[in-house]
Image (cartoon, rainbow, N blue to C red):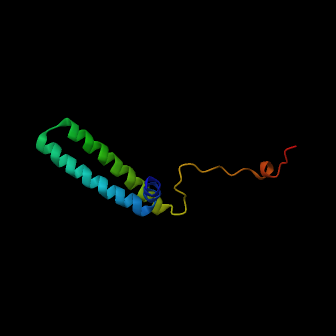
């Protein structure tokens, strides 16, 4: 389940879905923070809002550069001289 969720989160639709959910949660907590005056609610709002911004930036990057892989680690291509070198 978590593997599927991680793969979905790395897609354009995943970035959009997570951004919408995090924006709604930030709105919910800021409303609650204004009503209660709790600093903890404001802190939780800040966390959700930063996560929202992060997903929006990733979504914009995925839309502008669609061929770029979204994997965390991409192996560097080896130069031709090292690929053809035989080890004795």
Quarter residue 38 falls in: top left
Question: On the rendered structure, is 75 left or right of 80?
Answer: left
- Where residue 76 appears, x then y in whole percent? 65, 49
Q: Quadrant of the N terminus?
A: bottom left
- Location of residue 14 with respect to 40 vertically, above or below: below
Residue at 14 percent of width and 44 percent of height: 34
- Where residue 62 appears, x then y in whole percent? 47, 60
The outermost residue toward the left is: 35
The outermost residue toward the front is: 1
Residue at 78 percent of width and 48 percent of height: 82
The outermost residue toward the top is: 39
Count of marks, rendered view: 0
- Location of residue 65 with respect to 87 vertically, above or below: below
Question: On the rendered structure, is 63 left or right of 53?
Answer: right
Residue at 45 percent of width and 60 percent of height: 11
- Where residue 59 appears, x then y in whole percent? 42, 58
Question: On the rendered structure, is 77 left or right of 36?
Answer: right
């Amino acid at each position: 389940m978590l593997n599927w969720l991680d793969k979905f989160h790395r897609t354009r639709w995943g970035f959009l879905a997570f951004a919408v959910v995090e924006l709604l949660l930030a709105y919910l907590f800021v409303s609650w923070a204004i009503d209660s005056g709790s600093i903890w609610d404001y802190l939780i709002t800040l966390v959700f809002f930063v996560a929202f911004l992060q997903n929006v930036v990733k979504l914009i990057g995925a839309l502008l550069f669609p061929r770029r892989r979204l994997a965390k680690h991409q192996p560097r291509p080896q130069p031709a001289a090292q690929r053809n070198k035989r080890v004795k």
